[in-house]
Image: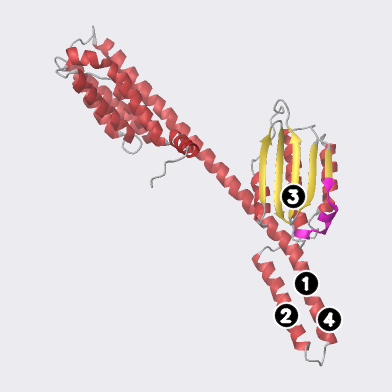
Amino acid sequence: MLRLPTVPALRRCVDRWAVSPRALDVVAALSAFGLMVLDVPGLARADNSLTGVTATLVLAAGAATLVLRRRLPWLPYAVALGLMGWLHELTMIQFALYSIGRYRGRRAAIAATLLYVGVAYGLFLTPGWPARHGDTLSDFLSLVVPIGVLAAGVGIAAYRQDLVRALEAQRREAAARQAVQEERISVGRDVHDLVGRELTVLAVRAEVLAVRARGEAHQKDFEELADTARRAHLMLNETIVRRADRDAATPGLEGLTELAGESERMGSPVQLTVAEEAKALSPLRQAAVHRVVRECLTNAAKHAPGLPVTVAITLEGPDLRIEVRNPLPKSPPDPAPVSTGTGLFSMEERVTSMGGTLKARREGAAYRVTALLPAGLGR
């Protein structure tokens, strides 16, 4: 049985299509046809032998080629030149020149405009085209040339804007990838510090047990365990990160008070709430909490200076919940804050790397960041 799409699904489909390039091409074709069809009475009456119906069909077929203007912009251009010579129709050439400038750039647009002016001049010299030339050649060209130059110029400007937007999108994407990469390196360093320390303790402990078990059956097992721990630590050094000058411990929950103090000194008071159970989190998870809270406080100081910030670290069943909320100012700060726009990517990478999720959104007159990640406490 054929199932019809539901209204929400149909609406989403229509919304996606409405912003698609194909929809814009269809709108351009319909616009060109709508403008040209206004000339149908004159075309049928004086310019040629077409009737009102056949002239409408010819113009509709010509306008339909604009649907292909992105892939084949020269096709509607050739059709426009044909309509100009046959039906004395100048509307289509404007859309065609704009399309060439928009999707093929400056050189193609200039060449197309010069060819258009040359063809128009040749047609002007052709006896019987159009029925009324105008008083002088300058009068005729004053109509023909601005049409082509303006349409091509607007298309070239749009082409350059498309390039600028594409470059800006690439820059943002590259910055986001860089932020993610830096956050992965930071996570790797934290793993190196925390896991490497445990591997060292394991190796030392196994060596002690091997000495105590000297002459016993388990001595060899303890020695192999110590060797395995040392090899694992070496692999950790080689595969995650190599550092020679990073001796400071990764900050955890104990560093949140200092972050709150720094924020208050910048003028944004912080209400900090940390559940007692959260202090049992692993050092790696505490480092993730510190990273998220630090970035949130930094963003609040930039975009909502002087306004209070609420930070809550709680446990919800097996999950750790980090929630940072601050009201938004009625007007943007002046001067505008300096921001790379990659902080959110860094926070999200840190949380997702540990199997969690992060949401940052505006809620009414406030901004809230919520992160959930497995607590790993075995509750």
The residue that mark 4 highlights is 208
Q: What mark, if any, has residue 227 been given in the picture?
A: 2
Which label sits on residue 321?
Answer: 3
Q: Residue furthest bottom?
A: 215
What segment carries the magenta color? Answer: 273-284
- Measure the C-alpha gap from mark 3 to mark 4: 40 Å
What type is the residue that disc 4 sits on? Val
Question: Mark 2 is on which residue type?
Answer: Asp
Q: Which mark is residue 200?
A: 1
Question: If you read the primary sequence from the N terminus, does the residue marked by circle 3 or circle 2 appear first?
Answer: 2
Tell me if residue 46 comes above or below residue 118 in the rendering. above
Residue 218 position (above or below residue 254): below
Does the magenta-highlighted stretch encompass residue 283?
yes
Give the residue drawn at x 76%, y 46%.
293
Q: Which badge, 2 or 4, is on the more N-terminal residue?
A: 4
Q: In the image, what residue occupies the spot 82% across and 77% down? A: 205
Q: Which mark is residue 179?
A: none
Which one is in front, 313 or 163? Answer: 313
Q: Position of residue 366 (x, y in %)?
A: 72, 33
Alpha-carbon distance for marks 2 and 4? 13 Å
Structural distance between the alpha carbons of marks 4 and 1? 12 Å
Dot 2 lies on which element? helix
Q: Give the SS element for disc 1.
A: helix
